[in-house]
Amino acid sequence: MKAVVTVIGKDQKGIIAKISNILFENEVNILDISQTIMQDMFTMIMLVNFENESVTVKQISEKFEQAEKDMGLSIHVQREEIFTSMHRI
């Protein structure tokens, strides 16, 4: 299953490392990634694949909660099909 992960927050060291490490530890593969800094705000969108489906979207969202608190981030995870259908014209 594929999902879209969005990350927004004040730019600081270690955001990509923190998020990608959480994904790695839970066997979630990053398929595509786009990140930029807009003034002092960090933004990132990732397409990820839950390869072994050993973790659910809800579980990975819960695992991101500590990173959100520690780093002052907003992290959202949506299944690809939900994301795609919401953004269809």
Image: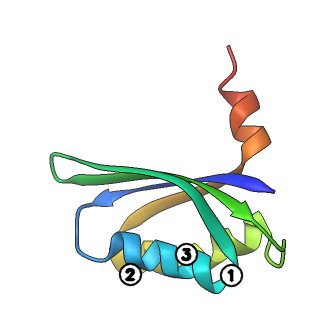
SS of the residue under disc 3: helix
Disc assigned to residue 87? none
Find disc 2 in the rendering and name its residue: 70
Find disc 1 in the rendering and name its residue: 26
Q: Disc 1 residue type? A: Asn
Q: Is residue 85 above or below residue 3?
A: above
Q: Disc 3 residue type? A: Glu
Residue contact between numbered discs 1 and 3, judged by CB atoms under 8 Å: no
Instruction: Tell me: 49 left or right of 66.
Output: right
Chosen colour scheme: rainbow
Instruction: Tell me: 85 left or right of 13.
Output: right
Whole-percent x, y for residue 16 in the image: 38, 69
How far separated are the C-alphas under marks 2 and 3?
9 Å
Where does the C terminus fall, quadrant-wise? top right
Question: How many numbered tags mark residues here?
Answer: 3
Where does the N terminus fall, quadrant-wise? bottom right
Image quadrant assignment for residue 71 = bottom left
Residue, x 78% and y 69% (percent of image)? 51
Crowd class of label 2 (few under 14; some 14 to 19; many from 20; radius 10 Å) = few
Q: Is residue 6 above or below residue 23?
A: above
Ranked by sequence position, the earlier of labels 1 and 3 is 1
Find disc 3 in the rendering and name its residue: 65
Whole-percent x, y for residue 14 in the image: 31, 77
Whole-percent x, y for residue 6 in the image: 51, 52
Q: Is residue 7 above or below residue 36?
A: below
Ranked by sequence position, the earlier of labels 2 and 1 is 1
Crowd class of label 1 (few under 14; some 14 to 19; many from 20; radius 10 Å) = some
Instruction: Tell me: 17 left or right of 19.
Output: left
Of circles 2 and 1, the one toward us is 1
Crowd class of label 3 (few under 14; some 14 to 19; many from 20; radius 10 Å) = some
